[in-house]
Amino acid sequence: MEWGGKKVCCPTSSLELFMVKAIFIIVVFLLPFAYAEAGTLDITASGGWNFTITAADLTAGAGSNIKDKESVANATLITISATGFSWKVDIRRSDSSWHGNLTLYARRTSDGTGSGLVFGGASYIPVGTTDTQFFSGSGSRSGIAVQYKLSSSVIVPPGSYSTTVTYTIVQQ
């Protein structure tokens, strides 16, 4: 069979046959390596922070500002499974019932353990309602500890306030 003046059916010489075999072998052996390079990327977080504000937490008694309040150093533990590339972790909050005069902060208090590396996030950053880069790294790490701080510069009325902190891992 010919198409455009060229034979398109089958290789006729041993050189053409070798070229077809060589291309097939390259494709078969490169696909597993291409798949392995894609790697994996996963994040899990456990823990949290619950507390009650009492009169001792107010700067000057009833009707005054809240003193900065900190969680334990490992209130949340993050585990990252990553092979094949670098990553960053974004942080944000989703308010259930939150007073606009409250500010939530987070910081990373440990590197965790594992074969990967972790950079940044050692200083408190405000946790807003949109993604903000928290820290970055490469490889897998487990037990990355996070501490929270709650602050208010003005009076917050008595009430129950809650928010959910979300961590998102992004390939870099």
Image (cartoon, grey):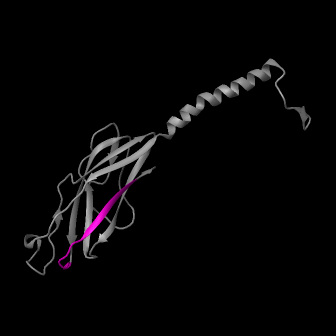
Foreground: 32 or 88? Answer: 32
Residue at x 77% of width, y 22% of height: 17
Residue at x 41% of width, y 48% of height: 87
Foreground: 96 or 72? Answer: 96
Does residue 55 appear left or right of residue 158 in this picture? left
Q: Name the image quarter holding residue 103.
A: bottom left
Residue at x 21% of width, y 66% of height: 150
Question: What span is colored magenta in the figure?
Answer: 154-168
Q: Please tell me whether residue 142 is drawn above or below residue 56 in the rendered image.
A: above
Q: Please tell me whether residue 23 is drawn above or below residue 135 in the rendered image.
A: above
Q: Percent position (x, y) of residue 7? A: 88, 30
Q: Name the image quarter holding residue 94.
A: bottom left
Answer whether residue 106 is magenta in the image: no
Examine the rendering and report whether any part of residue 123 can be seen: no
Examine the rendering and report whether any part of residue 164 can be seen: yes
Foreground: 99 or 117? Answer: 99
Residue at x 84% of width, y 21% of height: 12
Q: How many numbered marks appear?
A: 0
Q: Percent position (x, y) of residue 146? A: 25, 53
Q: Please tell me whether residue 106 is drawn above or below residue 95 in the rendered image.
A: above
Does residue 141 appear left or right of residue 153 in this picture? right
Q: Percent position (x, y) of residue 24? A: 68, 27
Does residue 7 appear left or right of residue 142 in this picture? right
Q: Name the image quarter holding residue 132.
A: bottom left
Q: Residue furthest bottom?
A: 63
Q: Residue furthest top?
A: 14
Does residue 24 appear left or right of residue 39 in this picture? right
Q: Percent position (x, y) of residue 106? A: 26, 59
Quadrant of the image containing the N terminus: top right
